[in-house]
Image: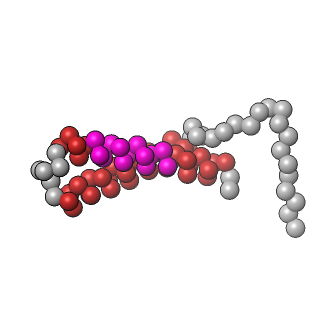
Amino acid sequence: MSRELRSVIRGSGVGTAIGFAFGIATLNTIGFDRITVFEGLLLLACAVFGGVLYGSLIGSTGAFRRETPAGAVTSKKAVA
């Protein structure tokens, strides 16, 4: 797995957590007694989806990538 892909996956995970927290905060602000279960799940799913998209976009830029030190030696894999 490449570094870029790992960075995108990490960004998606962080975006999922942020989107879920945002969705719960929005539901808490609106009030659970004013909406149906379907509307609540739909709002939460949309918030999580937006968080995943935003997190993967930020992750693809390298924000969640770990840089190797300049003097570090990396091992090469032999390909048959």
Furthest-left residue in view? 34
Residue positioned 11% across, 50% down in the render: 34
Residue positioned 30% across, 47% down in the render: 23
Q: In this picture, is 27 found above or below 72?
A: below
Furthest-front residue in view? 33
Q: Does the magenta stretch include residue 17?
A: yes
Q: In this picture, is 69 found above or below 6?
A: above
Q: How is the image coloured?
A: secondary structure
Total numbered labels: 0
x, y percent for residue 33: 13, 50
x, y percent for residue 2: 68, 52
Residue positioned 16% across, 58% down in the render: 36
Q: Residue 80, can we see it?
A: yes
Q: Residue 57, can we see it?
A: no
x, y percent for residue 59: 54, 44
Q: Does the magenta stretch include residue 53?
A: no
Task: Tell me which secondary structure the magenta stretch mostly adopts.
Answer: helix
Looking at the image, residue 76 sits to the left or right of residue 25; the answer is: right
Furthest-bottom residue in view? 80
Image quarter where the N terminus lies is bottom right
Looking at the image, residue 74 sits to the left or right of residue 47; the answer is: right
Image quarter where the C terminus lies is bottom right
Residue range corresponding to the magenta coloring: 13-25
Residue positioned 59% across, 46% down in the render: 7
Viewer-proximal residue among 63 and 17? 17
